[in-house]
Amino acid sequence: MDSHPASEEGIQKALDVLRTGGAVAHATETCYGLACDLQNPEAVDRLFAIKQRSPDQPVSALFAKVEQAQAFLEWNEEAMQLASEHLPGPLTIIMKKAPGCNLRVCPTGSESIGLRISSHPTARALVEQFGSPLSTTSANIHGQPNTFSKEDIEKQFAAAGHKPDLILDDGPVEESDTSTVVDVSEGIVHVLRSGDISL
């Protein structure tokens, strides 16, 4: 695994990796996460191999802002209210895909997508400069603890057959709860996981 400080130069190196189908570990407001290009099926397959995650368990999508996400998702009143009150921040809002949406959040396909808009400057810089949605999922092997530093990631993936291509090193991030996950795809707010945001 290559690693670079999360400077502007490091972000440019990370963007190069993402544009060529690689996976980048970077800090978020909750833990370190893994980003890949959700419009590149091979990149998504690689992400799932790195995480050793079941191909039918979707990851979430990181968007730069609500306006970008409106092109990919079917928004409703509940989603707009939650977004206006809590985003950017540690909240995942699950919505149905809009017609023609080409984002691939798991290898087997999914009719819905979990939206994230991060409050962490590195995560935001990556998705803003990449120009289209990225995956956002914890930078760990499925079933293993979340990672909160470059050292955590290196230790956890030391013996793994597949590893992240690049770590953007922001130093240790404060350990916190995972994001709160809500499903509003049917027009009601259904809390699937409680986290940093209490609803």
Image: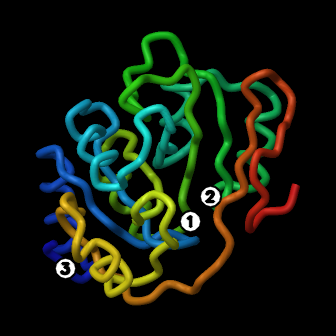
Q: Are marks 2 and 1 in contact (CB under 8 Å)?
A: yes
Which element type, helix, strand or loop, lies under badge 3? strand
Q: Position of residue 21 (x, y in %)?
A: 17, 44
Pair 3/2: label in front: 3
Distance CA(mark 2)–CA(mark 1): 5 Å
Question: What kind of residue is marked 3?
Answer: His
Q: Label 3: which residue?
A: 4
Q: Amino acid at mark 2?
A: Pro
User: Which numbered tag is attached to residue 129?
Assistant: none
Label 1: which secondary element: loop
Q: What is the spatial separation of the Cα atoms under label 3 and label 2, in whole angstroms?
A: 25 Å
Label annotation for residue 119 = 1
**Colour pattern of the rendering:** rainbow
Q: Within 10 angstroms of label 3, few (less than 14), some, or many (20 or more) residues?
A: some
Left or right for 119, reference 53: right
User: As drawn, which residue projects farthest toward the top?
Assistant: 99
Mark 3 touches mark 2? (CB < 8 Å) = no
**Kind of residue sitting beneath label 1:** Ser
Q: Quadrant of the C terminus?
A: bottom right
Q: Residue 58 location in percent, x, y?
A: 50, 37
Q: In the rendered structure, which disc, 2 or 1, sits on the residue that comes first in sequence?
A: 2
* Residue 16 position in % (x across, y down): 13, 55
Mark seen at residue 88: 2
What residue is shown at x 24% (from left), y 63% (from top)? Answer: 164
Q: Secondary structure at mark 2?
A: loop
